[in-house]
C-alpha cells in the first residue's frame, strides 16, 4: 500500500514554513494522540503517520531529501515501521517542545525532571505592603506521595531498570542515513519501570493536594514584586525535585494615599481662612496623625513635603516622603450674616484688588492685552 504524501498528511502546502508545520502537527497530535484515542488501532496508526511526517518536514536535511526523492529517501536501512522509524518508538514525543506538557507525558530532559513552577496572586492593602506581614495562603498543587515516598512503587517494591534503554532514559534510532537519539518510549525517559505501582498515586509518585503555606511579606513591597518560595511548586514525577512557587504581589488602591515609588501623596482640604491667615492643621500618615504648618496666603494646589513619612524601600532601605497637596474649600451653606461678612471683606479690598489677589490681577491684565492686540 502506497504511503500518503507527508504534506497532505499534515494538511500544509509544499512551501509551508516551520511555524505552519508545527501548528498543523500540534493540532493533529492533540486529536490523534494515544492518550486521547483509548487504544483505537486506526487512530494510533494515524498518529504515527502524523508524527512521522512532522519529524521529516521539520528537519531541513530530511525535508530536502524527501522533496527530491520522496519516501524512497528513507527506505534503505529503514527497518520496521513507517519509513525507517522502527524500534517500537511510535509514541515517544521526540519533539516535546512543540506541545510542552499538553499530554502530561512529554519528553524528559533527564531522569529527574523537576516539577513545574507555580504562581500565586496575592492582594495586599497599602498598610500591609508598607509595614510587611505574614500571611497564610492555600495553593492547590501536586505533592510527593507519602506511602511510596515519591517513588511511585508500592511499599515493599522498587522501580526496576528499564529493559529497553537499560536505565539510560534514551534510545538511538536509525532513520535512513541518520541516527537519532530519542526518549525511551517504554519508561518515558525516567530510566525505570514501575511493575507494581503505588495504590495511592498509581505510579506517579505524587498526588494532588491543597497546601497551606505561611508567606513572610517584607516591608515595602509594591505591585509587581515577586516573592520566591523555593521547592514549594509542583512535585516532580517519580521523586523528582519540586518546582518553585512565585507569590505575585498586587497592592490595592487606598482611599487617602497614592503611592509613587517610596513617596506617598494625599490631598488635604483646608478652609478659606486657614489659607489666607495660615495655621496648623492635622494630616493623616500611615503612622498616625501629624501636624502640618500652613503659611499665610497659601494657594490651592500648594505642595508640602513631610520627610520620612513615606515608604521604606524593600531593596535599599531608603525612606520616602509624604507629599500633601492643600486644596482650599469654598464655604457652602452660608447664613445671611456670613454672606454679609464676605461682602464686607470684598468691599474692603476696594478697587485695589490686585494687591490682595495678584494672580487674578495678572490674569485680567493678560486678557485686556489679548483683546487690545486683536483690535489693532
Image (cartoon, rainbow, N blue to C red):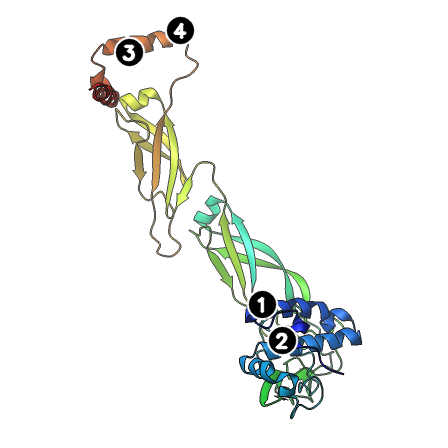
Sooner in the amino-acid sequence: mark 1 or mark 2: 1
Which element is circle 4 on?
helix
Say the numbered circle drawn on residue 336: 4
Residue at 33 percent of width and 52 percent of height: 318
Q: Disc 3 marks which residue?
A: 346
Sooner in the amino-acid sequence: mark 3 or mark 1: 1
Residue 324: quarter of image: top left
Q: Disc 2 marks which residue?
A: 54
Q: Are marks 1 and 2 in contact (CB under 8 Å)?
A: no
- Mark 1 surroundings: few (<14), some (14-19) or many (≥20) residues within 10 A: some
Q: CA distance from mark 1 to mark 4?
A: 81 Å
Q: Quadrant of the N terminus?
A: bottom right
Say the numbered circle drawn on residue 20: 1
Q: CA distance from mark 1 to mark 2?
A: 11 Å
Sooner in the amino-acid sequence: mark 4 or mark 3: 4
Judge depth for marks 3 and 1 and give the one in front. Answer: 1
Can residue 372 be seen in this snapshot?
yes
Residue 134 spot, x, y in % from top left = 52, 53
Q: CA distance from mark 4 to mark 2?
A: 89 Å
The residue lying toward the viewer, choosing from 319 and 179, is 179
Which residue is at the far bottom? 77
Q: CA distance from mark 3 to mark 2?
A: 88 Å
Q: CA distance from mark 3 to mark 1?
A: 78 Å
Amino acid at each position: 500500500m502506497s504511503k500518503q504524501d507527508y504534506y497532505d498528511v499534515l494538511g500544509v502546502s509544499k512551501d509551508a514554513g516551520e511555524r505552519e508545520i508545527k501548528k498543523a502537527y500540534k493540532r493533529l497530535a492533540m486529536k490523534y494522540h494515544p492518550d486521547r484515542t483509548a487504544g483505537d488501532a486506526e487512530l494510533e496508526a494515524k498518529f504515527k503517520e502524523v508524527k512521522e511526517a512532522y519529524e521529516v518536514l521539520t528537519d531541513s536535511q530530511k525535508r530536502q531529501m524527501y522533496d527530491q526523492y520522496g519516501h524512497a529517501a528513507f527506505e534503505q536501512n529503514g527497518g520496521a515501521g513507517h519509513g525507517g522509524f522502527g524500534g517500537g518508538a511510535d509514541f515517544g514525543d521526540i519533539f516535546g517542545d512543540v506541545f510542552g506538557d499538553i499530554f502530561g507525558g512529554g519528553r524528559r530532559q533527564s531522569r529527574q525532571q523537576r516539577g513545574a513552577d507555580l504562581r500565586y496572586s496575592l492582594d495586599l492593602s497599602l498598610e500591609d505592603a508598607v509595614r510587611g506581614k505574614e500571611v497564610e495562603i492555600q495553593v492547590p498543587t501536586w505533592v510527593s506521595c507519602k506511602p511510596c515516598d515519591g517513588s511511585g512503587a508500592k511499599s515493599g517494591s522498587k522501580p526496576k531498570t528499564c529493559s529497553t534503554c537499560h536505565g539510560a532514559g534514551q534510545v538511538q534510532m536509525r532513520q535512513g542515513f541518520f541516527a537519532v537519539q530519542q526518549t525511551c518510549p517504554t519508561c518515558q525517559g525516567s530510566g525505570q519501570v514501575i511493575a507494581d505501582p503505588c495504590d495511592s498515586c498509581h505510579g506517579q509518585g505524587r498526588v494532588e493536594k491543597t497546601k497551606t503555606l505561611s508567606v513572610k511579606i517584607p516591608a515595602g513591597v509594591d505591585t509587581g514584586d515577586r516573592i520566591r518560595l523555593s521547592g514549594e511548586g509542583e512535585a516532580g514525577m517519580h521523586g523528582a525535585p519540586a518546582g518553585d512557587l512565585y507569590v505575585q504581589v498586587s497592592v490595592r488602591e487606598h482611599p487617602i494615599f497614592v503611592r509613587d515609588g517610596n513617596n506617598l501623596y494625599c490631598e488635604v482640604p483646608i478652609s478659606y481662612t486657614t489659607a489666607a491667615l495660615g495655621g496648623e492643621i492635622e494630616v493623616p500618615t500611615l503612622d498616625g496623625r501629624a501636624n502640618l504648618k500652613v503659611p499665610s496666603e497659601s494657594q490651592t494646589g500648594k505642595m508640602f513635603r513631610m520627610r520620612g513619612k513615606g515608604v521604606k524601600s524593600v531593596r535599599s532601605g531608603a525612606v520616602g516622603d509624604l507629599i500633601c497637596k492643600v486644596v482650599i474649600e469654598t464655604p457652602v451653606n452660608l447664613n445671611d450674616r456670613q454672606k454679609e461678612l464676605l461682602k464686607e471683606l470684598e468691599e474692603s479690598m476696594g478697587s485695589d484688588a490686585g494687591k490682595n489677589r495678584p494672580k487674578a490681577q495678572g490674569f485680567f491684565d493678560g486678557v485686556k492685552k489679548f483683546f487690545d492686540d486683536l483690535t489693532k
